[in-house]
Image: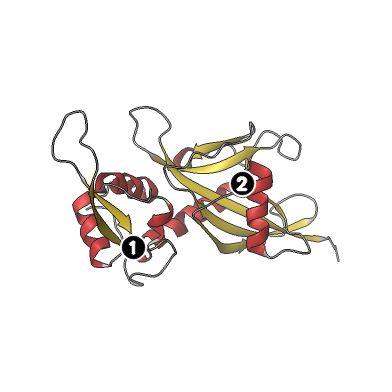
Amino acid sequence: MHHRSTVHEVLIAVFQVRSFAAGQAPELAVLLWQRALDPQKGSWSLPGGVLSDDEDLPTSARRQLAEKVDVRTVAHLEQLSVFSDPERVPGDRRIASNFLGLVPIVSDPRLPPDTAWHPVARLPETSFDHGTVVRHARNRLVAKLSYTNIGFALAPVEFAMSTLREIYTAALGYNVDATNLQRVLGRRKVIEPTGRTSPSGRTGGRPPALFRFAESSIRVTDEFAALRPPT
């Protein structure tokens, strides 16, 4: 019987809604760093690394983000799943605990030269099974946007509904109606009006009302809810 050492690692899929070019609609992006050494030199990896003997999984995830990609603050971080295929990486067997991290649209963390945001819809060549991990994390995010208030971790503190519509559209991958979104999230007491308005744009018009999320920690709002694409 063949025996190998087993290593427990942590991988973090950090998502943010970002604009990649002026005039283009925002997209859901994931943070990746480029491998400088073999195996799979030049491919793009999720931030992460080996779990230390003296730390739990969330502590390790935050440490890996700080050390690998210099991201020290995320609005939301949670463990999602475990990837344990014996052949997922060469060499010692690696069991990976996958985390979901979210960064608000207004945040712009300073990144190392080997690190960049990439559109989830157009991933580059990824290392090992990291592309699968990204897609799994994105699917979990989409589901959680339906039945929790997790959108707070992608949004600014205060926002017009047009901004929140862009965030949900980018994260869900289909167009969202702002009026319907406001009605659904308001009915679930996820968002609330601030009583303030945003300055009018260059074309004038009525200043848009500003909203905020009622809470900045995750909670289930409707366990049977599902946001669906328009028919």
Mark 2 highlights which residue? 46
The residue at the point 63 percent across, 35 percent down is 112
Q: Which mark, by number, is residue 197?
A: none
Q: Position of residue 77 (x, y in %)?
A: 54, 58
Q: Position of residue 109 (x, y in %)?
A: 54, 40
Q: Is residue 98 visible?
A: yes
Q: Which mark, by number, is residue 214?
A: 1
The residue closer to the viewer here, 221 or 205, is: 205
The residue closer to the viewer here, 161 or 207, is: 207
Camera-side mark, 2 or 1: 1
The residue closer to the viewer here, 99 or 138, is: 99
Amino acid found under the numbered disc labelled 2? Leu
In this view, the residue farthest toward the front is: 196
Q: Position of residue 207 (x, y in %)?
A: 18, 41
Q: Badges 2 and 1: C-beta atoms under 8 Å apart?
A: no
The residue closer to the viewer here, 61 or 42, is: 61
Secondary structure type for disc 2: loop
Q: Is residue 174 above or below residue 152?
A: above
In this view, the residue farthest toward the bottom is: 223
Q: CA distance from mark 2 to mark 1?
A: 31 Å
In the figure, is residue 96 to the left or right of 178? right
* Nearest to N terminus: mark 2 or mark 1: 2
